[in-house]
């Protein structure tokens, strides 16, 4: 379960009408402030500004956004379209929106009953994400135990994948936390991570609250850590996984995968099945979000760090080919090697699937 004093996301129904309350991640780590969202444009703005971010929680937010539109009498179909397009690389967002819309339509597509159905589906997805986080943490820790026998390992992580990206314990960070609580984590290396320093601001904040041994580093320092033999495994999340096993994740992930392969270090991706997009055939087909250039050229609004007029290349994500991924940990089992067959099989399992003894790894 998440250990946040202020929940990442919650639904509330004050007298003036239902609202969605979001922990504003752009204000962390200095302040824990909730945003009150009363309509879909407000939620879209919160998603695009990264006030709420992270693949699993975006799915839940999208579902609640549909429920909010239905409850307040807005055009649900238009709301669904704008929500799904708010961050195009993150497949979970569209997944959550689609689930709530399907429930809304099945209940008549209008009126109080349909609105209640959309809200019930959003709450169901919310509960599932909590359960899935716990299962990924257990499976991921088991996998690390097999890959790195003896424990006391040093993990490198990128971006933020803890409770802030999930209504549960998270994805990759949840695995690191499980290892820490079992006394198996020697050090968590935290990349600062572009575009908004999600690692330095958010992962370090969560690690400190957990009492983990952690160190923040600039993204460009990762190579020197590998060269010094200071990394035992890389554990990251994902925003979309194509049918061939290619992984779209925060910019800088691909470089870590190349370094890991060169140095013989396991590279593990932790993500729920809802992040797997079997409709996208390969990594090259994943649409990559381009962020505003000022996030690179300005230290803060109006505080330039580059010459006026400098062009900036600022993709939010990159794509790691499947041959560089040691294993994919999902709530329904571990896939290794990561390929179309393994992904399709794990996606076909029911949520109630129980892994056999060990970590449920697939493949030879």
Image: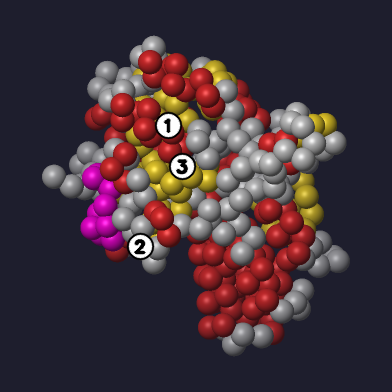
Q: Which is more N-terminal, label 1 or label 3? A: 3
- In the image, what residue occupies the spot 60% across and 65% down? 84
Read off the residue under disc 3. 237
Q: Position of residue 135 (x, y in %)?
A: 39, 45
- In the image, what residue occupies the spot 39% across and 54% down? 283
Q: Position of residue 61 (x, y in %)?
A: 62, 58
Answer few, some or many: residues within 10 Å of disc 2's Cα (few below 14, many 20 plus, some between 14 and 19).
some
Q: Considering only vertical position in the picture, is 261 above or below 349?
A: above
Classify mark 2: helix, strand or loop: loop
Give the image quarter of residue 10.
bottom right
Answer few, some or many: residues within 10 Å of disc 3's Cα (few below 14, many 20 plus, some between 14 and 19).
many
Range of residues picked out in magenta: 334-345
Read off the residue under disc 2. 281
Q: Which is more N-terminal, label 1 or label 2? A: 1
- Say which of marks 3 and 2 sits in front: 2
Read off the residue under disc 1. 256
């Amino acid at each position: 379960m998440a250990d946040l004093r202020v929940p990442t996301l919650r639904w509330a129904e004050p007298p003036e009408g239902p609202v969605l309350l979001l922990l504003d991640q752009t204000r962390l780590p200095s302040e824990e402030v909730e945003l009150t969202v009363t309509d879909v444009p407000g939620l879209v703005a919160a998603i695009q500004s990264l006030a709420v971010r992270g693949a699993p929680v975006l799915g839940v937010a999208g579902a609640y956004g549909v429920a909010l539109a239905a409850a307040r009498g807005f055009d649900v179909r238009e709301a669904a379209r704008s929500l799904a397009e708010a961050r195009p690389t993150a497949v979970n967002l569209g997944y959550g929106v689609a689930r709530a819309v399907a429930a809304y339509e099945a209940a008549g597509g209008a009126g109080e009953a349909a609105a209640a159905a959309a809200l019930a589906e959003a709450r169901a997805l919310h509960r599932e994400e909590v359960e899935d986080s716990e299962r990924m943490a257990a499976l991921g820790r088991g996998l690390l135990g097999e890959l790195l026998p003896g424990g006391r390992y040093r993990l490198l992580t990128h971006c933020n994948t803890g409770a802030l990206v999930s209504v549960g314990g998270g994805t990759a960070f949840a695995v690191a936390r499980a290892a820490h609580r079992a006394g198996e984590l020697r050090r968590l290396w935290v990349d600062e991570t572009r575009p908004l320093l999600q690692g330095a601001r958010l992962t370090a904040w969560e690690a400190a609250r957990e009492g983990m041994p952690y160190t923040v580093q600039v993204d460009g320092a990762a190579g020197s850590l590998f060269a010094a033999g200071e990394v035992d495994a890389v554990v990251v999340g994902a925003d979309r996984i194509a049918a061939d096993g290619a992984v779209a994740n925060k910019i800088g992930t691909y470089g870590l995968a190349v370094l890991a392969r060169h140095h013989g270090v396991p590279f593990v991706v932790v993500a729920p099945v809802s992040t797997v997009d079997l409709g996208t055939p390969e990594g090259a087909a994943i649409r990559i979000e381009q962020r505003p250039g000022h996030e690179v050229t300005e230290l803060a609004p109006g505080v330039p760090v580059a010459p006026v007029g400098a062009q900036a290349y600022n993709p939010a994500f990159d794509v790691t080919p499947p041959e560089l991924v040691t294993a994919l940990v999902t709530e329904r089992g571990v896939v290794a090697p990561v390929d179309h067959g393994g992904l399709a099989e794990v996606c076909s399992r029911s949520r109630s699937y129980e892994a056999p003894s060990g970590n449920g790894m697939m493949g030879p």
